[in-house]
């Protein structure tokens, strides 16, 4: 009997805000949600952005004045809207109007020598043979150089790329715990993993107590690595900019660190640990491994996700020089304006000129269906499978190819075989990769249109999260997952509101790419699609909570589901408690630095299992020969 991987929690942050309880999704569709959800969304974002906080049990503004939740929008609403989603890059990242760089200069003497003074300890070692050095008083020296000298001078330039999908203004994940000079992506990882675990309404220790410790898995990675100064960014440029490489920059810069940080500081996991980078499909690559391990019975609970903080001058220049990012001149030309609209830089399936980079961290918590039933976990959906296929021979490593036809077709065929034609044709939708490049809008839409024709689908809804949060690279398909779960919950289909109309070269005959948000009603299936650089294609088939519960009832029976519903009540109550605290800025970050260390000397080992003093159940050793037909 194949286990069904059930989504029981989600958490994270991107340009739309916090992921848990659909806050980020509701920011995107803010004008379509009801009054209660709107008020909660504004309060939650205001707390995240440090505009309000809980003081002595009361909600207060920054001056300490008490404020009613109903008044938050009227006082801070525009500031919240302006400080979320894609916008001009803020100076806590870098100054896009005066981006620091080093100008190379070839200096030649106008007479016989170049002459200057400096401190003796600033002399290069060894001293170039042509330099004439004379000692002066006060530890200084005079230098004469009879030839040309190449120097690098501090300079500033106007960056042609000025917008990004940034975490909400004022939100600093590292300020929520003792972040110890960690890169921003790892700070976001700690926040996101905590948010995902807390959102389940079930204490992590309660989960581990009823399974063996090796039945837990963590699956995560970043793509670019941690490119801030505290990570690889500092490692590669410190010496060239006259600074010292730290002892942590290499280790903290590795793209496996989001997995390692969760194991070491959040869950204390001794089970499966896995990191796979698949360019823009990284979240789905890791989800696929978790799903396969869960279906095979190797794990019973998993934390799956990705984190990326790529808003640095170097990363942006790298993508920009590939002509992949939307720049100022391209946007002005599109709008026939002398001013670029930084809120509308990402335009999936419309007339566009490149994608917009974003930062974020997205994680979900998976349980197998039996464990979800036993614990009364809140069912948010389930993952039927994730398909990954490459493109074959390529002329350009960054160009799209045929692999995505395979992943999409397999996902659609699987959904049809499980749920039937009606669900597929009437109640399914696509979370598109939708990168906002001219090439993507043509090639991706053609895939959808041809598959829709093959499976007799008409008016297939297509949503595109990157229009609002940008392209977060590793977590991008996690952003799509968060939107899918929001659509299931709120029954609102986000339109691509950053475009005026669908571009004429988009293959749109069988697709419904709306330019406004709309009420979609009950949906059964989400197809999360990703097309990564290098031919890293992945598509996931995700079932709604209603479908998932129906499948569980068929497997376990009505009586078992009645017992599940009784357990769910206490879980829902715990979820509501965290929801209220999080909306007020109390995230109760899990960061166990140096806590709960396992006593290796106390491990009891025999030929059947390993027993740890810190875990309720032992780790069983393999005791059957899987190759008995061969030996």
Image: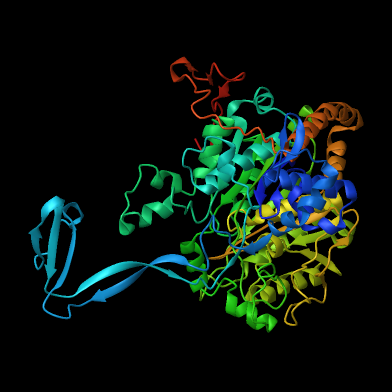
Q: Nearer the viewer, residue 494 or 138?
A: 138
Identify the image quadrant of the N terminus: top right
Q: Nearer the viewer, residue 279 or 272?
A: 279
Q: Residue at x 58, y 33 (%)?
A: 266
Q: Nearer the viewer, residue 350 or 484?
A: 350
In the picture, measured across the screen, residue 490 lies left or right of residue 578, that is: right
The answer to which image quadrant residue 531 occupies is bottom right
The answer to which image quadrant residue 333 occupies is bottom right
> Is residue 440 placed above or below 258 in the rendered structure?
below
> Is residue 354 placed above or below 234 in the rendered structure?
below
* Image coordinates for residue 365, horizontal then vertical, percent: 68, 39
Say whether residue 333 is visible. yes
How many numbered marks, from 0 up? Answer: 0
> Is residue 445 placed above or below 221 in the rendered structure?
below
Q: Residue at x 66, y 48 (%)?
A: 13
* Image coordinates for residue 449, horizontal then vertical, percent: 77, 72
Say whether residue 456 is visible. no
In the picture, measured across the screen, residue 526 lies left or right of residue 223, that is: right
> Is residue 314 placed above or below 37 in the rendered structure?
below
* Image coordinates for residue 136, horizontal then vertical, percent: 10, 56
In the picture, measured across the screen, residue 22 lies left or right of residue 134, that is: right
Q: Tell me which colouring the rendered structure shows.
A: rainbow
Q: Nearer the viewer, residue 524 or 22?
A: 22
* Image coordinates for residue 400, horizontal then vertical, percent: 60, 71
Q: Residue at x 55, y 42 (%)?
A: 174
């Amino acid at each position: 009997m194949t286990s069904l991987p059930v989504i029981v929690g989600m958490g994270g942050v991107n340009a739309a805000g916090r992921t848990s309880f659909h806050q980020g999704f509701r920011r995107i569709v803010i004008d379509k949600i009801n009054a209660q959800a709107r008020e909660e969304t504004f309060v939650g974002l205001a707390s995240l952005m440090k505009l309000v906080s809980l003081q002595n049990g009361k909600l207060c503004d920054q001056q300490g004045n008490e404020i009613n939740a109903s008044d938050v929008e009227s006082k801070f609403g525009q500031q919240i809207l302006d400080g979320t989603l894609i916008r001009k890059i803020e100076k806590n990242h870098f100054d896009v109007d005066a981006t620091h760089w080093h100008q190379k200069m070839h200096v030649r003497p106008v007479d016989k020598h170049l002459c200057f003074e400096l401190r003796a300890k600033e002399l290069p070692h060894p001293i170039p043979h042509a330099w004439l050095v004379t000692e002066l008083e006060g530890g200084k020296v005079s230098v004469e150089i009879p030839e040309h000298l190449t120097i690098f001078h501090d300079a500033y330039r106007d960056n042609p790329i000025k917008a990004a999908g940034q975490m909400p203004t004022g939100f600093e994940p590292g300020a929520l715990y003792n972040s110890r000079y960690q890169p921003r992506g790892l700070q976001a990882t700690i926040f996101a993993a905590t948010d995902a675990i807390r959102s389940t309404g079930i204490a992590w220790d309660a989960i581990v107590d009823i399974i063996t410790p090796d039945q837990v898995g963590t699956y995560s990675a970043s793509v670019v690595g941690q490119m801030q100064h505290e990570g690889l960014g500092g490692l590669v440029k410190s010496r060239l900019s006259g600074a010292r490489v730290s002892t942590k920059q290499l280790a903290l810069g590795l793209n496996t660190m989001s997995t390692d940080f969760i194991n070491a500081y959040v869950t204390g996991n001794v089970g499966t640990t896995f990191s796979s980078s698949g360019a823009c499909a990284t979240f789905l690559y890791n989800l696929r491994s978790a799903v396969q391990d869960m279906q095979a019975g190797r794990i019973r609970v998993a934390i799956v996700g990705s984190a990326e903080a790529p808003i640095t001058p170097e990363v942006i220049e790298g993508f920009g020089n590939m002509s992949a990012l939307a720049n100022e001149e391209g946007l002005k030309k599109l709008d026939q304006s002398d001013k670029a609209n930084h809120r509308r830089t990402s335009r999936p399936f419309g007339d566009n000129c490149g994608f917009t980079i974003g930062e974020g961290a997205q994680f979900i918590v998976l349980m197998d269906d039996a464990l979800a039933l036993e614990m009364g976990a809140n069912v948010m959906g389930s993952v039927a499978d994730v398909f990954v296929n490459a493109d074959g021979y390529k002329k350009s490593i960054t160009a799209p190819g045929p692999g995505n036809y395979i992943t999409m077709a397999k996902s659609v065929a699987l959904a049809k075989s499980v749920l039937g034609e009606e669900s597929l044709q009437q109640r399914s939708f696509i979370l598109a990769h939708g990168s906002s490049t001219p090439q993507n809008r043509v090639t991706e839409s053609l895939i959808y249109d041809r598959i829709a024709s093959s499976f007799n689908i008409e008016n297939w809804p297509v949503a595109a999260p990157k229009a609002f949060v940008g392209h977060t690279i590793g977590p991008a398909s996690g952003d799509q997952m968060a939107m899918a779960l929001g659509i299931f919950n709120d029954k609102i289909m986000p339109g691509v509101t950053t475009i005026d109309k669908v571009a004429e070269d988009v293959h749109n005959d069988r697709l419904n790419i709306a330019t406004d948000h709309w009420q979609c009603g009950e949906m059964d299936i989400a197809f999360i699609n990703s097309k990564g650089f290098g031919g890293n294609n992945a598509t996931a088939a995700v079932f709604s909570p209603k479908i998932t519960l129906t499948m569980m009832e068929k497997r376990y029976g009505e009586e078992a589901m009645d017992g599940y519903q009784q357990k769910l009540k206490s879980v829902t109550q715990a979820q509501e408690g965290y929801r209220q605290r999080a909306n007020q800025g109390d995230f109760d970050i899990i960061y166990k630095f140096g806590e709960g260390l396992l006593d290796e000397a106390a491990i009891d080992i025999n030929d059947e299992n390993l027993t740890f003093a810190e875990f309720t159940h032992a780790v069983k050793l393999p005791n059957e020969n899987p190759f008995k037909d061969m030996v």
